[in-house]
Amino acid sequence: MGFFVLTNNPMVHERAASGIEVVFAAGGIKGVFECAARYIADGHRLLTHPLSGSVKPGETPYKSVLLAGEASPAMDDASARLISEAFAACDKFAERSAFWPAHTLRDLQMIDLSLIEGALESARCDGMQAQ
Amino acid sequence: MKLTLGKIHIQDIVFSDETKLENGVVHIDPSQLERKVLEDDKIATVSFDVAKPGESVRITPVKDVIEPRVKVEGPGGIFPGMIAGVDTVGSGRTHALAGMALVTAGPIVGFQEGIIDMSGLGARYTPFSQTINLVMVCTPREGIEAHEYERAVRMAGFRVATLLGELGRNVEPDEVREFETLDFVEGLHQFHDLPRVGYVQMLQSQGLLHDTYVYGVDAKKIMPTVLYPTESMDGAIVSGNCVSACDKNPTYIHLNNSVIDDLYAEHGRTLNFVAHIITNENVYLADKERSSNQTAKLCRMLGLDGVVISQEGFGNPDTDLIMNCKKIEAEGIKTVIITDEYAGRDGRSQSLADADAAADAVVTGGNANQVVTLPKMDKVIGTLDYVNKIAGASAETLQEDGSLVVELQVITGATNEVGFNTLSAR
Amino acid sequence: MEKLTVLHYINQFFAQIGGEDHADHPVEFFEGEVKGPGLAFMQRFGDDAEIVGTIVCGDGYFNEHHEETLESILAFVDRIHPDLVIAGPAFNAGRYGVACGAVAAAVQERLNIPALTGMYVENPGVDLYKDKTYIVSTKNSAAGMRAAVKAMAPLALKLARREPIGASCEEGYISQGIRVNFFEKQRGSKRAVEMLLAKLAGKPYTTEYPMPDFDRVDPQPALTNLSKATIALVTSGGTVPAGNPDFIESSSASHFGEYDITGVDDLTSGAYETAHGGYDPTYANQDSDRVLPVDVLRDMEREGIIGKLHNLFYSTVGNGTAVASAKAFAAEIGRKLVAAGVDAVILTST
């Protein structure tokens, strides 16, 4: 069973180790969640929690999520619930990332990359193969 | 394991030509401390300042808050695995410079948050308006990577705290307390008629600016395990975490964990405080399942009747919290959980990202989205550059009269989830 | 210091006009008079406040003439312009609770006059109005009148004086589902340890954050063969035969109806209507298929998409109906459907 990274973070693209499949999602965090929701509806299970990190949605425009590469015949209820609660959480925070200068955006990309790298490490230890 | 903790009440901090502790006053030779910090060439400059309770001073952005301590007797030293060696700590005698704190400040990355106001409305919401703060503001060497710089500042903070703690080694403390946890078999016999209670502490463990270290080990990598409750009093658990300001635990909180304090107050009288169980909050879902399975297993193995569970941070840790609660309750062990809330500015949104009927005993540190207006302070230690852009701030944050309209999120320790404060919500 | 002025809203029962048989009593204004529980309030208020008039309305009447009644009540309140309006307390009387909540909320919102009511926590009025006005928690019958007045009076005076109102647990009103921060006397960790000790000893404790009750129901496995399945229609939209022969209430329904649609292809406007008082009935009355899609299901029957449309449909009104009642209806309807060999249900609501 493999996995892939769904992300809108250009740094994840740049720096993800070779052999890791990265799928780009357009838009802000909600854009990533919408894309994830479609994959989940198609039977791909979430491998990471969508609300990774404590930098709030809105403060950061970046989000990376790990999904199972293979689609199961039935949708995973837990994944569906997690993504719908993630949408609800977004609505509590104001969109603020327009204020950030370029170097701050890069810092936010780095934080998101660090969060997903931790998860990639766990996925590898879990016996998951990169897709 | 038994620890004697002696608190030396610090009355003031002054700059001088010699670093010493005399009659409750800490004298600082800034150049000596500067040399200590700049031992690591990743830090370009450091400056020191003092902020006292009641002053019109704002410290921002805050990275960590640390209480200086020193191991006077017994194995190991403060901050094992980080500064001291890896001997098991928590026994013997330790002195603390109480009433003061070392605050590391200055941005690690370009969006950091964390405000400590020493007076005004903001002071009501942070515990660190009550401590005399020695602030060290660092700047990075050109071209340094954020990971490396974070580690450099973190370690510099511990080095300075250790240097300051050493000042208390031969000073007679103003207040001495003994904390003793009997081993399981002895405790079971001695307190056979008391309920067996444990403290499950969830540690933030997700990545850069979101990490915690236990005896120097990244908490992301640990399996849930058992500590004596006195180990964290010697700095066995330290913070690498500074997001989000309101509900992350600075090292000061780990050293002065109020759940441990309040459980010890009842120990031997109304309950048997058996153990301190630590677990993590990884982003990877299977890790959450593994850790909560193991945590519940440990609670059962220890024969616990009840636990207090505290979490750290926002969002996905709510899932760990609910998993831990459900699985422990399923073992027939009663739980009380401590959390904070993100209920939106109007207080009408769902406070937690997860929920379950099993979590029927909740203590809350308050709604972090509550908006407050912080008055202008005469002096800023650090920089206000980021304030407009930090958590809870918006284009309207900085008002014409210099006041700040922000959410509680940005105030260091405001909605602390080990129940350190009295702020709550209904 | 001048006495604060209060207007009091009560129903036909507490005004001693009559019981259920007088529920259709039209709204009446008794300027300068104190009635029923108003006397208890006056005693509690002492020199601080006085009731300067009482508004009385039958619960049924308020329900059936919601808009106009509210308008005339607001006009009266506006003319007198008291410092405060108190409604009830309504205890567990559903229509009374809804009326009290509606009056208090309207007075606050439209006249900017503070208002307060009281009712039992399960009264449907609570869910509808708890975040639109202050509702003090009372016992579930008028036997709790003394305690209710005792709890309501201090909050009433605070509201009348326009003092800031604290968190629900501080002031004694039912949590509005709006989280309000405040400072406790003890720190959180101490409160946690005390809560745990109480929980371990089997003693009562109050959680500081009640978990939202999702009442999750696991979905049944999907039908394998729709073309052989018997589908039943159930609605909380209030669809009933013309004339509402079973008198299903327009709100706070106390029962459901069971209706035979053997040979009925289409719900026509002369034969069917809606009893629901919570939405504009015009379009539903024009064509009840809009709420209960009999016509579409008959088409599907003919086309072989479904096996059969069940010959009975079940209907009630969801408007302000207590959750406990809804659960009870569902259990009974469910039993009947299972006994009749129905495979699946389409549940419509409005």
Image (tube, coloured by chain):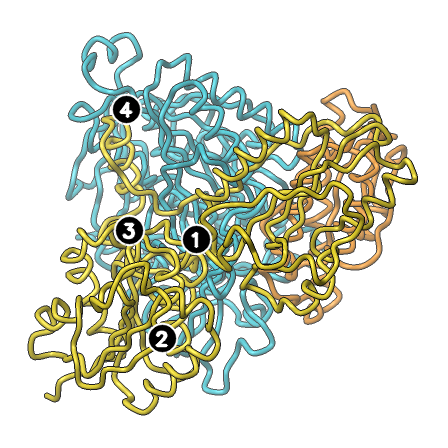
Q: Amino acid at mark 1?
A: Leu
Q: Residues within 10 Å of mark 2 (few under 14, many from 20)?
A: some
Image chain in orange: A
Apparent colour of chain C: yellow
- Residue depicted at 77% across the width and 38% down the height: C309
Question: Chain B colour?
Answer: cyan
Instruction: Say which chain tag 2 marks.
Output: C
Q: Nearer the viewer, mark 3 or mark 2?
A: 2
Q: Chain of mark 4?
A: B
Q: Which residue is mark 4?
A: B273
Measured in 3D between alpha carbons, the distance from the residue under mark 2 to the one under mark 4, in whole angstroms, is 65 Å
Please give the residue where the numbered disc 2 appears in the rendered image. C26
Question: Helix or strand or loop: what does disc 4 sit on?
Answer: strand
Give the image quarter of residue A58. Answer: bottom right
> Do the numbered discs 1 and 4 sit on residues whose CB atoms are within 8 Å?
no
Mark nearest the camera among 2 and 4 is 2
The chain letter under disc 1 is: B
